[in-house]
Image (cartoon, grey):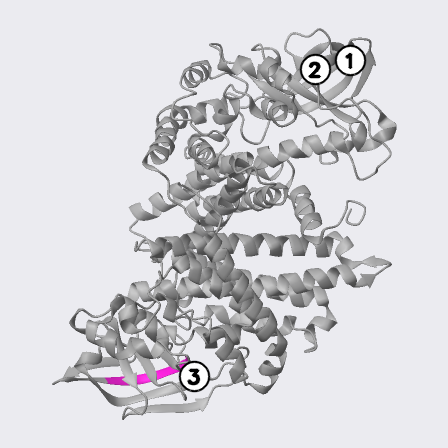
Amino acid sequence: MIDFELSPEEEASVKMAHKTAEELLRPIGRYYDEHEHESPQELIDTMWERRAEGNRDPLGVVGALRIEEMCWGDAGLVLCLAGPGLGGAAVFTSGTQEQMGRFLKRFGEDKPVWAAMAMTESGCGSDTSAITTTAVRDGDEWVLNGEKIFVTAGKRAVEESDGFVVVWATVDKSAGRAGMKAFVVEAGTPGMSVEKLEKKLGIRASDTATIVFEDCRIPYENILGSPEVRKLDKTKTAGFQKAMATFDATRPIVAAQAIGVARAALDFVKEALEKEGIEIRYGLPRQKLTAIERDVMDMEATYKAAKMLTMRAVWMMSQGQANSLQASMCKAKTGLAVTKITQKAVELMGPLGYSGKYIVEKCMRDAKINDIFEGTGQINMLVVARRVLEFSRDQLK
Amino acid sequence: MISFSPTEEQQMIVNMVKQVATDEFRKVYREADESGEIPAHVVDTAWELGFISTGIPEEHNGLGGERSAITGSLIAEELAWGDLSMAMHTLCPALVAYPILEMGTPEQQSKYLPAFCGDKYKPATAALIEPRFNSDPCALSASARLDGNDYIVSGEKCYVPLAADADLLLVYAAENGSTQGFILEKGASGLEVGEREKNMGLKALPTYEVTLKDCRVPKTNRLGGKDGCDFNRIMNCSRVALSAMAVGVARAAFEYSRDYAKERAAFGEPIASRQAIAFMLAEMAIEVDATRLMTWEAAWKLDRQENATKEASLVKMYADDMVVMVTDGGVQILGGHGYIREHPVELWLRNGRGFATFDGMAII
């Protein structure tokens, strides 16, 4: 039955997330935006202790709604909180039972711990099949060599906790996508080091690291999925499919984060207008609306459109339904939607919008990343287009 | 619990409606648009599915089923996917039946509802839109004032579907600053149906200008009697119905241009193999889905009897823009062929452009 009602417990859980965002994240968001690379240790510890509170369904719709609330508080801070993150998601979607036990157990323990995902390289972003980092088998070990950039929470996973990084590398360059495999590298493994932290437009509280692998040796059983390279059948690109399966799970989550940032800006605008006695008159015919009413209604409708697509993608995943199309739809829509909503908010608020004293300019900077990471808007459009056309990557490049 | 899955029963209804839309509407829609006439058997076949009688209680000869705005949205989308003129024609009697069902007095219900439960299509319609630039459903120029036991209703209306044939006409007019409905029967004195309108789209649906010249309506025919009607809710039910129909029209255009783009070759490959076209189609698909989900949410609020003004007007505004973007994309993808009436995309663009105008022309 089509239904949008939250149970009282679910609603309480979402409200609790909002309260946390309001009390713990909002007040310090600006500080960590201005003090890039400083660690909000107290927040990290507190949130780690409280991580189980009200979080009954982390990968379901309620989990997504909680993420929206938290990112309404501050998206950069949410991204720096300890937890399985994208690395954990990769293990969860493509690891064996044994691997899940070995790698994910630490998230149930007392000390904050991070897991990151390392895919992007300086020479390749969206074209993840072009990676040059190599993994060569040597007896009971894999030997990794290469350099990864833009690793979210990379430093915290590698240097500040007993975490791990899921590294995508090729075991056979000639095999293209089929040769791409994911490997779990534990923090403290010799040969892995953090080279630098990026300075960014937004989400500055989140560390974005460059990680170098020099003859980095890891146990053979740290490969996620099958080590076999299936070259014969061009359509079967098993290694790459694992990466894509991870995206089906993570794209809607990133979209939920984005929506939270957009709503923060939208709420600011609506409160500011209310203070000025400007009311948004819903239900008026369009020729009677003022320009600002029209703009705000556009922003609200766009926010709602993105949110509904996101909730659907998350819901499908929680129902065990294939959601690649819907995950990319929600990500493509949301990345662009939050970019536009927050940019419009800066415009509408004028001096208040552009000023570092208020949240709107920060929302705009924080929002932009959502149209870029976990697949740019364009890559997601490409995925959607291929799916709706039922075209292969050769038919639609 | 949040869910995006229609019930089995709803899915069955959707399949049934889709079949009528495919087998009946889609067979004749182009011809109907050219000739301005919908073959009677098409409307009769759709009427036989009992969309309106299902929700009417047994005591008024209906089937006594549950009336749901969500189910209504699913039906409206499929019908409009088949053809918008035919969808509006099929559902037009609801413009009178539903407000009476929800807000009518017991007398109004027992007098008028049974007629909507017969085997034969019951022509009935509503007059809301006014022929002036600043037409506003909540600030109408048409007026009603009490005079003894009658209301005197006067004003001018346009886009009144089926007005020439309708047995019943629900006229909306301003009474002391609020919009109220008045039930007029065919041939009421002072009720003048003008020439059939010539519109950009919706060409198969006869619409008329209607003039009310000091038209006397018995006091008992004020919708809802003394209490009047909840006009806000009527508007919201209309917004949701129209949003669902916009989704149907847009989906038709998306599907057609998608299939065309896969077939049509240029520079040695299908035009859909170029991102310029493929991305248009991706955006169209995304926006159709987004609007559908927003429509469901607004419908869900209506079903809970909550005030849905915000949700309904936001989705309506979004749907108005979406359907123009998508149907225009359809014409654009077909290029020169899209402009030729041999292909249906130009029809969908003409129909789609109307949604911003169609206030109150459909209800759920």
Mark 3 is on which residue type? Answer: Leu
Alpha carbon separation for disc pair 1 and 2: 8 Å
Q: Nearer the viewer, residue A146 or B165?
A: B165
Q: Quadrant of residue B333?
A: bottom right
Q: Residue A5 location in percent, x, y?
A: 37, 44
Residue that appears at 60% across and 24% down: A92
Circle 2 packing at 10 Å, graded few (<14), some (14-19), many (20+), is some
> Is the residue under label 1 in contact with that under label 3 (CB below 8 Å)?
no
Looking at this view, is B246 or A241 the one in front? A241
Q: Secondary structure at mark 1?
A: strand
- The residue beneath circle 1 is A142
Span highlighted in magenta in the image: B153-161
- The CA span between labels 2 and 3 is 71 Å
The reply to whether callout 1 and callout 2 are in contact (CB within 8 Å) is: yes
Chain ID of residue with mark 3: B
Q: Which mark is residue A222?
A: 2
Marking on residue B162: 3
For badge 1, the amino acid type reads Trp
**Local secondary structure at mark 3:** loop
Q: Is residue B321 visible?
A: no
Mark 1: give few (<14), some (14-19) or many (20+) Cα within 10 Å.
many
Q: Position of residue A177 (x, y in %)?
A: 79, 32
Q: Is residue B173 above or below residue A250?
A: below
Could you confirm whether marks 2 and 3 are on the same chain? Answer: no
